[in-house]
Image (cartoon, helix red, strand yellow):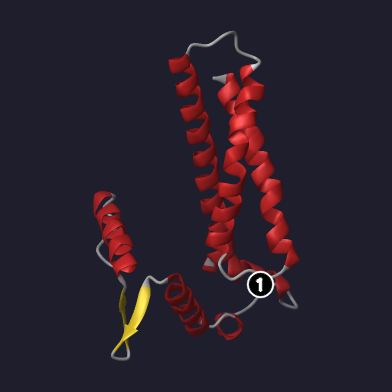
């Protein structure tokens, strides 16, 4: 199991360093797509990482090698998905935005009116709808927003998960 962790963590560290480059070069609109492309670029590195970590193991039969490669890929993907959750919690969290606006205020505190003036809920909703339109999960039909086929599928998954975890029916 140690070689699995060594191989997947080494490639994950390459991903962490590599993903900074596109974000530092210019502002990126399609963040999820960019992170996915960087992850896909790093995935082939699992192969040499596997052979580097395999040097730790004695001669291994083919079935055990397959299990090792599969486990390495799974650990790497779990790390990547965990990072996405972490990243988007910071990138899109209204709570974090409230905290940052409060920190950036002159006295380090804001009353509700000043917070609302700095952080417009209408802007948040408009920005979110624009992102959903760009991602192709929402479309405009007869002047109203509706789910695309992709949005329908994601919505059904979300609805099933909300039902499973008893999180209520609404959004």
The residue where tag 1 is placed is 102
Q: Quadrant of residue 108?
A: bottom right
- The image shows residue 96 at horizontal and vertical percentages of 59, 64
Q: Is 93 positioned to the left or the right of 171 in the image?
A: right
Q: Residue at x 60, y 21 (%)?
A: 3
- The image shows residue 41 at horizontal and vertical percentages of 60, 48
Q: Quadrant of residue 106?
A: bottom right
Q: Residue at x 65, y 73 (%)?
A: 101
Q: Is 100 positioned to the left or the right of 148 in the image?
A: right
- The image shows residue 121 at horizontal and vertical percentages of 49, 81
Q: Quadrant of the C terminus?
A: bottom left
Q: Quadrant of the N terminus?
A: top right
- The image shows residue 17 at horizontal and vertical percentages of 71, 47
Question: Which one is in front, 79 or 170?
Answer: 79
Q: Is 22 positioned to the left or the right of 139 in the image?
A: right
Extreme residue toward the top, this view: 58
Q: Is 76 positioned to the left or the right of 135 in the image?
A: right
Q: Residue at x 71, y 69 (%)?
A: 26
Question: Which one is in front, 74 or 45?
Answer: 45
From what the image shows, is residue 138 above or below residue 52? below
**How dense is the environment of label 1, judged by Cα within 10 Å: few (below 14), some, or many (20 and up)?**
some
Q: Is residue 62 visible?
A: yes
Q: Residue at x 70, y 69 (%)?
A: 103
Q: How many marks?
A: 1
Q: Is residue 171 visible?
A: no
Q: Secondary structure at mark 1?
A: helix
Question: Which one is in front, 29 or 171?
Answer: 29
């Amino acid at each position: 199991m140690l070689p699995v962790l060594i191989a997947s963590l080494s490639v994950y560290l390459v991903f962490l360093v590599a993903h900074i480059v596109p974000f530092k070069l210019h502002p990126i609109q399609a963040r999820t797509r960019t992170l996915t492309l960087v992850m896909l670029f790093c995935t082939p590195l699992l192969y040499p990482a596997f052979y580097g970590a395999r040097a730790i193991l004695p001669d291994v039969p083919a079935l055990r090698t397959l299990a090792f490669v599969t486990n390495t890929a799974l650990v790497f993907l779990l790390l990547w998905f965990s990072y996405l959750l972490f990243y988007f919690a910071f990138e899109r969290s209204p709570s974090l935005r409230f905290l940052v606006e409060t920190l950036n205020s002159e006295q380090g505190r804001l009353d509700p009116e000043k917070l609302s003036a700095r952080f417009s809920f209408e802007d948040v909703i408009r920005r979110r709808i624009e992102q959903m339109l760009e991602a192709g999960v929402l479309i405009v039909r007869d002047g109203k927003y509706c789910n695309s086929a992709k949005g329908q599928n994601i919505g059904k998954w979300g609805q099933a998960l909300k039902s499973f975890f008893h999180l209520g029916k609404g959004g």
